[in-house]
Image (cartoon, rainbow, N blue to C red):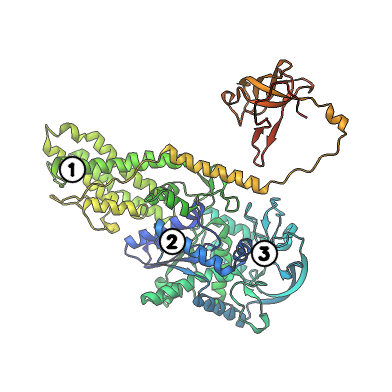
Amino acid sequence: MSTLSKKRYTITSALPYANGPLHIGHLAGAYIPGDIFVRFLRLNHKDVVYVCGSDEHGAAITIKAKKEGVTPTEIIDKYNKQIKDSFEEFGISFDIYHRTSEPIHHQLSQEFFLNLYEKGEFIEKFSEQYYDEEFNQFLADRYIVGTCPHCQNDGAYGDQCEKCGTSLSPTDLINPKSTLSGNTPILKETKHWYLPLDKYQPWLEEWLIEGKKGELKSNVFGQCQSWLKSGLQPRSMTRDLDWGVDVPLAEAEGKKLYVWLDAPIGYISATKQWAIDNGKNWEDYWKTQANPEEDSTLVHFIGKDNIVFHCIIFPAILHAHGGYILPDNVPANEFLNLEGDKLSTSRNHAVWLHEYLEEFPDKQDELRYVLTSILPETSDSEFTWKDFQARVNNELVAILGNFVNRVMVLSHKYFDGKVLSGSALTGADQNVFEELSKYPGLIEQSIGSYRFREALSHFMNAARLGNKYLADEEPWKIIKSDEERVKTVLFVASQIVANLAALAQPFLPKTATKLFEMLNLPQQSWEKAGQVDVLTDGHQFGEVQLLFEKITDEQVEFQLSKLTQAKIDNAKAAFVATPVKANVTFDDFMKLDIRVGTILEAEKVAKTKKLLKLKIDTGIDQRTVVSGIAEFFTPADIIGKQVSILVNLEPREIKGIMSQGMILMAEDADGRLDFVNPTGAIKSGSTVR
């Protein structure tokens, strides 16, 4: 049975940590694909619930709270609101955006734990775990950093290396350090409850590797296969923390549930709350039914760093508990990079969603379009502001927007905004209609296979079809000689616009709404797509609206300058002055002859990026100096500049040029060079002491 032929759907997108804002990597990983899929299901009258919410537990929250000097509650309240508001303004159509701090979630998470505990599913054991003596507390995985034993990344966490994606245990790290004190932690004995993943390995291999082969995306299947091949190990389901869901056992006072036990249960607790609010039965969406064909279809939209939790750990928990459906698919995406570098929240190398919404108001669909067109579906991809500008200007504006605008403007100009059938359809008209009818099926096939980039390209090809048709027929040239033919051409073109409005709904919802308003039509369901009689003879259009505006060079430069400034700020924040060199005698220092010089001429050294050839008046003579400052200064900008120059440096040949001295430069924390020069005009040849 096709994925899209099912009756009921439970769709989730990864719960974002409520310890910071959303960026475009989050959107491309879990939220835009999920939203496209859900909107498509709704257009096809499916029974669907789309759930998400803030993940408000775990070490990430308390680490953020400590950094900001506030309580964890203040952190989650702040970022939950910001994240929820950003999702709503951007147009992600969750049925509910919940919180794992809600009582209904704590109760359900504890019920899951007790169910497994009473069945004897857990292994209780004492183990040595890292402990920070200065802070007198055990360290959760994210409170420990060190060197990854697999890729040698120095910033790996105690549960995972975010560089290579390998799952870790704290004791795997080389040179572990506490993030609280910066000290090397000690090992201290503590008791925890472990889920024996090795016990479920045979079942997981049958359900996942044998049952899902050919269904899961290659990147997802490969990672799961690698995990199982390495052999699963018991994993602790409790933590020594002061923030989270209490372990519901008298002997476990002060311990909390592991966040990756309670977080995915957040999907279920959110559905329960939604059901209460809307008079639904939550069990229809999560529990197995007497007739398996009545089971809801569960799909998790996530990023690749969460594959193991959604494909192995959470299914094992659901299986051990019993009575719950299992994921039908987990179409995880890889990572989105930004301007040639990894997205990084800590380095502020990101395009933050809340800032984008402030700086590009009413351009939500433009970002949706560009991110969908570059989704990292099976391998990492990259967002650049120049590409964003090109895709918006050359595709949305020049193809889709241009076609729709011409059809609407000409219809109003020639026929007062009415659709008129005109003369009989020609072979060219019928060919266009035949081609148009194929696109809904192509898009459905792509969406059903989680190939959203491909689905979007089919949609844009439908717009290209309309653009080409109008350009070929040139109604503006024949309006005076054959008005009836112009009516027909605009009739055909208008049907294409109506189809584009229907087809746009999963991808560009705000644009689709504008199109339906211009067409003076109510929102259409998917079965209307591909039909060529949506608009009847005599139908009256609404007012013309501009769909898209061009992205300017100034807007792009501003965004690039923000990223550059973030790099500078990071470098300065991380700057540590180099240690003092060994002492020199006063006599050694006096051997240096440093003078004030004036740059008379400057030119780039051929076939080099960094070198400038300078002619400098030293007050003693005029001499040539080769200096590696071309990345920071243009020749025209530095002529006449006064510099400090070491004039008694042994001459040396550089790129065939004899350099007679060295100008002194200061290097900033970010690697930028600047002149060390007097504040006022000093005579060339003056001594620097």
- Say which element carries label 1: helix
Q: Quadrant of residue 396?
A: top left
Q: Nearer the viewer, residue 186 or 570?
A: 570
The image shows residue 423 at horizontal and vertical percentages of 12, 41
Q: Residue 85: give its label.
A: 2
Q: Is 443 situated above or below 199? A: above
Tell me how many marks there are.
3
Asked if the residue under mark 1 is in contact with the one under mark 3, i.e. CB atoms within 8 Å, the reply is no
Q: Nearer the viewer, residue 576 or 46?
A: 576
User: Which amino acid, by three-letter code, is at mark 2?
Assistant: Asp
Indicate which disc, 3 or 1, sits on the residue closer to the N terminus. Answer: 3
- Say which element carries label 2: helix
Q: What crowding class fits label 3: few (fewer than 14 Cα within 10 Å), some (14-19), or many (20 or more)?
A: many
Q: Is 461 situated above or below 323? A: above
Q: Is 502 situated above or below 19? A: above
Q: Residue 134: give its label.
A: none
